[in-house]
Image (cartoon, rainbow, N blue to C red):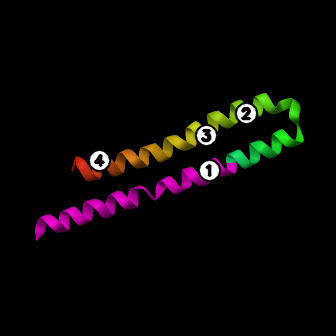
Amino acid sequence: MEGSIVQAAKLLGAGLAMVGAIGGGIGIGLLANGALQGMARNPDAAGTIQTNMILGIAFAEAVAIYCLVVALLLIFAV
């Protein structure tokens, strides 16, 4: 009985840890939206905007990867 409660708590905690990945997804969407609007309004700056967009996407995706790592640690390591 006690083992199943611990397993349920681990899975619940892992699910709650993955809620942070929603922020990464929303951030990437907003970032791509802004970059595309900027490129459409000023095509000469498209290279600079694209470079900064890719860097921003990498940072936003890192947050989602950290959430995944925490969730996997809760499931398998604890």
Which kind of residue does numbered mark 1 sit on? Gly
The answer to whether mark 1 and mark 4 are in CB contact below 8 A is no
Residue drawn at point x = 62 percent, y = 50 percent: 27
Q: Which residue is mark 3?
A: 57
Residue at 87% across, 34% down: 43
Position above or below: 68 against 8: above
Q: Secondary structure at mark 4?
A: helix
Q: Earlier in the sequence, mark 4 or mark 2?
A: 2
Which amino acid type corresponds to the residue marked 4 in the rendered image? Leu
Residue located beneath label 1 in the image: 27
- Which callout, 3 or 2, points at the residue further toward the start of the chain? 2
Q: What separation in Å lies between label 3 and label 2 (alpha carbons)? A: 10 Å
Instruction: State the CA–CA distance, disc 3 to disc 1.
Output: 8 Å
Is residue 11 in the magenta section? yes
Q: Amino acid at mark 3?
A: Ile
Mark earlier in primary sequence (3, 1): 1
Secondary structure of the residue carrying tag 2 is helix
10 Å crowding of disc 1: few (<14), some (14-19), many (20+):
some
Q: In whole angstroms, how far apart are the C-alphas of marks 1 and 2? A: 16 Å
Snapshot quadrant of residue 17? bottom left
Q: Which residue is mark 4?
A: 73
Q: Tell me, yes or no, whether the two marked residues, 4 and 2, touch with CB atoms within 8 Å.
A: no
On whether residue 34 falls in the magenta region, the answer is: no
The magenta segment is 1-30
- Please identify, in this view, whether the residue under mark 1 or under mark 2 is nearer the observer: 2
| Disc 2: which residue | 50
Q: CA distance from mark 4 to mark 2?
A: 34 Å
